[in-house]
Amino acid sequence: MARYFGTFGGQYVGEVLKPALFELERAMTEILPGSEFRREYSHLLRSYAGRPTPLCRADNLTRELGGAEIYIKLEGLAQTGAHKINNALGQVLLAKLMGKQRVIAETGAGQHGVAVAASAAKLGLECEVFMGSADIERQQPNVFLMKQFGAEVHPVEDGSKTLKDAVNAALKCWIEESSRTFYVLGSALGPYPYPDLVREFQQIIGIETKQQLSDMTGRLPDTVIACCGGGSNAVGMFSAFLDDPVRLIAVEAGGTGDKPGEHAVRMGKDRTMGIIEGYKSYFLQDPDGQVQLTHSISAGLDYAGIGPELAYLGDAGRIEFARATDSDVLEAYSRFASREGLLCALESAHAASEVLKQAPQMEKGSILVMNMSGRGDKDIFITAGRLYPEEWKQYLLREAAK
Amino acid sequence: MRNIKIMAHLVAGYPDEASCIQAIHALADAGVEIAELQIPFSDPTADGEVITRASQKALDAGFRVRDIWRYIDTAKSLGFEEVHVMTYGNIVYRWGVRSFLEEMHSRGITGVIVPDLPLEDDDRFYAAAREIGIGALPVAVPNMTPQRKALLKSTASEMVYAALRQGVTGRSTDITGESREFLRSLDIPKIYAGFGISSREQVLSLEQFAYAAVIGSHITRALGSGRNAYESVRNAVERCL
């Protein structure tokens, strides 16, 4: 297996982690293709995770926008509410078959942490999740869920106290003890072989979508849209279409503005390469190479780096990059809810916003597919507070007073 | 008479420029032979809590990468036998791998330590260092296989930084017969051995097995006490001499 996508990727870790990464690479070639893993993984996906997830035709938006026919892949219907479970189950099962007793994970918004905690509960492994203390403040419901699934949640107080610091803390924990511990990385990034491992488990999104669309329409889509933080749902959706004549658009977090700290757009005009958290890719960083703060209304896209394969495909021109601002996102969130009865996660609402821009410009009869990577129940403390500030505040005050 | 040199580590700019400069003076006055200056990085994955927090504090106080020259110039003027610079891959990569090494070499830096640039040397860091004639110290760890040790030996030429245990910096280390066997197995002339060293006993137990004992987090912890920087560092180091 190649360690790079062009010049992106690699395995930039201290020597101390090399044995654990070599062990993981060996497990990928020996355990993943084996019938025991295949059988159990596909059983879990069907009987526990809720796969295949539906592909839904968005009739009302199609009519209203007047261009392409819009189809939405409902990854939010998977167990724990997002595509994250595909990867979490795969990696936790791999850990179990490798004989590991404990899994650790980083989480930003908490979606990956919840998926790993649930998978570990299901498969009977110990689970510890590292989460920035700033994210813990913002995402109490997911902290609660992880604890219910029996995971120990470690607050991370370093740096910006967000996702990147949680990744660092998980890596350090793994450096301390890797013989009985498996690190379940949540996005298609980090040192080789993680980007390949995560794609391996997420590519089912695109494979199912292609089959379902073919069953429904007999053809390929013209355009496929996915949101993009680290990039696991985008890689998962796009990988099935890379060799087809299909336009692929990844949507980054435009945040509140263009200044450093106001967004998480890595693939803008001034892309800067870096070597951070074990891989080489584009990162938001200052001229010295210090990682910059990012902002997005969606915690899941609020990250300074992008997975190496997506960065490579972006440079190669195979994937286009767009962005959606926080206010675009809230508008799309409300519109998909009221027209289609679909509550997008704020991350996925970035893709939804791009659908609203692209569909009207496409020819009638053309097909546009969007990946709704997660559902939006988890965001109610953010969305309700933004959309109905006064009622929501009164409700919270009443609840707190009980 | 101690039969091993001391390499003392400081995070440049921590807790502030003036205190850090005083700390360098304290090391020189205490008789430390080798100074190791760390360029702070926002995401230091090989460091424990003490150095991670110190790096963040230096950056929050406005440390810029090229400020390192002021600390290097101070150290050079105080007559240390060797001055080394430690940092992370991204700092070197943004600077430019070759120009970083050339500029460090021209200022008289003996060696550079960048723990997340691997032995496979995809970015020609170790190769360029050899061409330029500056030391680039790879990090050896106890869990290395014989194959990795062979690769290390060909990469390292004559200097190596040896971590005495698995893990990140800062936590205390028991130096055992196994540790010494690990150092011997490296078969490299100049071994700078560290991780969790904070006492004279630990330093002396490395005699004949290492060229230098590295004292790192112990000094940074002392600097974080809020007391006089010079005195705290001098006391902390003298405990190990």
Image: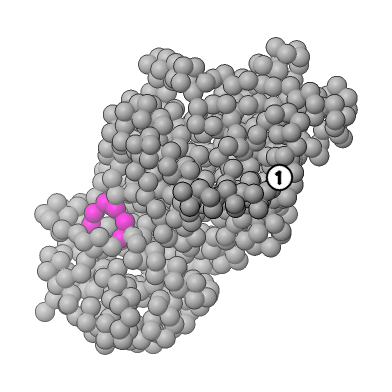
- Please state the horizontal and vertical placement of residue A55, each as a whole percent of the image: 67, 21
Q: Amino acid at mark 1?
A: Val
Residue range corresponding to the magenta coloring: B164-169
User: Is B188 located above or below residue A317 in the figure?
Assistant: below
Please name the residue shown 61% across and 49% down the image.
A392
Which residue position holds label 1?
A329
- Please state the horizontal and vertical placement of residue A82, each as a whole percent of the image: 55, 32
User: Is A67 located above or below residue A300 in the figure?
Assistant: above
Question: SS class of the residue under badge 1?
Answer: helix
The picture quadrant where one finds residue B241 is bottom left
Q: What colour-coding does the image apply?
A: one colour
Residue A122 seen in render: yes
Q: Chain of mark 1?
A: A
Question: What is the magenta segment's predominant secondary structure?
Answer: loop
The picture quadrant where one finds residue B194 is bottom left
- Looking at the picture, tell me which residue is in the foreground, B190 or A366: A366
Is residue B149 left or right of A383 when viewed as pictured? left
